[in-house]
Image: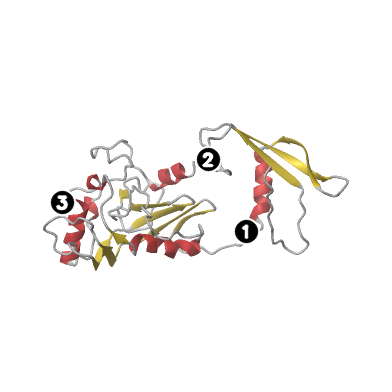
Amino acid sequence: MSNHSSVFETTAGGMALTSAILLYRTERAYGAESYGAARDAAAFASIHAVEQDADGRPVIAAGTPLSRAHLRQWAEALGRTVVPEILPANILVAHPDILAWWVPAQVRPAYFALSTPPKGLEILSARTIVPVPYPAHLFVATRSGLGVYALPVNRRPMADTRLLHSPILNVFVEGQLCWGNIPRPRALAVASIPDFERAVFDSWSTHPNPGQEFTVTGRGGLVRLWDDLAARRARRFPVRRLKSFDPGIRRQGRRTSAEPMTFGKLIERTMR
């Protein structure tokens, strides 16, 4: 058995080891996450008192099945050690496993270095930094990545707000940021929001990701749309050209779901 040890900083009076929770699941596949459970795996949990043997060493005693009541009690106790945080107005969801916020529409510098620019571009045929208009955006950060979505209107989204594909070239059609060699924020915290936004807005766009030609309407695709906006020094992004978000749209540009993806549905799906 591996020999693990941890050090905890406690409040005045100290803390004592009193209980242990044991998690069981079906045998995991090689290389699976050690502390997670596969979505399709069966699981069981038990809670045990921790006693001391004759030498004063902790021993896990017989246990009982872990119940929702146990979880509520421990969640409340753990919550008392969380430092209260005042959330900015742009925060939509703040949870230990998910952080969601929105960014209003605005003109900001964009970084283009297209590896194979199409012929006839006016501005983006060479590496350049140029101001362009961005639509309002929704960001959903989790411990596994960053979701980036455009919003149909320039206001705080509600649960029923329909989501659009982001026109940013570094975003996959499934909505996730393509990190490449971009540094990842170390913490999933409000203080890390500027780092997440820099990863999106201050990174170089080198090419559209597969399927992005199906995420906008009109002729020319995303690259020519950005080139036109840069050449005209546009102040507003044409949101009408963005299609409703559908993670399966890369299949010949066809919608895979009749129901539009909303902010509320996205959060529900992310938390599963």
Q: What residue sits right under mark 3 in the picture?
A: 220
SS type, badge 1 = loop
Q: Residues within 10 Å of mark 3 (few under 14, many from 20)?
A: some
Q: Report the residue marked by disc 1.
A: 82
What is the three-letter code of the residue carrying label 3?
Gly
**Which is more toward the observer, 43 or 267?**
43
Question: Which of the pair 10/81 is nearer the observer?
Answer: 10
Residue 211, position as x, y percentages in the image: 26, 44
Q: Quadrant of residue 84?
A: bottom right
Residues under numbered marks 2 and 1 in contact, where contact means CB atoms less than 8 Å apart: no
Of badges 1 and 3, nearer the viewer stands: 3
Check disc 2 and give the amino acid type: Ala
Q: Could you tell me residue 4's position as x and y percent?
A: 68, 50
Residue 219 lies left or right of residue 139; in this view the side is left
Q: Residue at x 33, y 38 (%)?
A: 259
The numbered disc on residue 93 is none
Q: Residues under labels 1 and 3: Cα distance?
A: 51 Å
The colour scheme used here is secondary structure
Residue drawn 68% across and 39% down?
22
Query: Sequence order check: which comes first, mark 2 or mark 1?
Result: 2
Q: Secondary structure at mark 3?
A: loop
What's the residue type where badge 1 is placed? Answer: Val
Query: Which mark sits nearer the N-terminus, 1 or 3?
Result: 1
Quadrant containing the N terminus in the rendered view = top right
Name the spot of residue 127 as percent of width and height, x first. 23, 65
Please identify, in this view, whether the residue under mark 3 or under mark 2 is nearer the observer: 2
- Looking at the picture, does residue 12 appear above or below residue 272? below
Are the residues tagged 3 and 2 within 8 Å (C-beta)?
A: no
**Which residue is the site of mark 2?**
32
- Looking at the image, tell me whether mark 3 or mark 2 is earlier in sequence order: 2
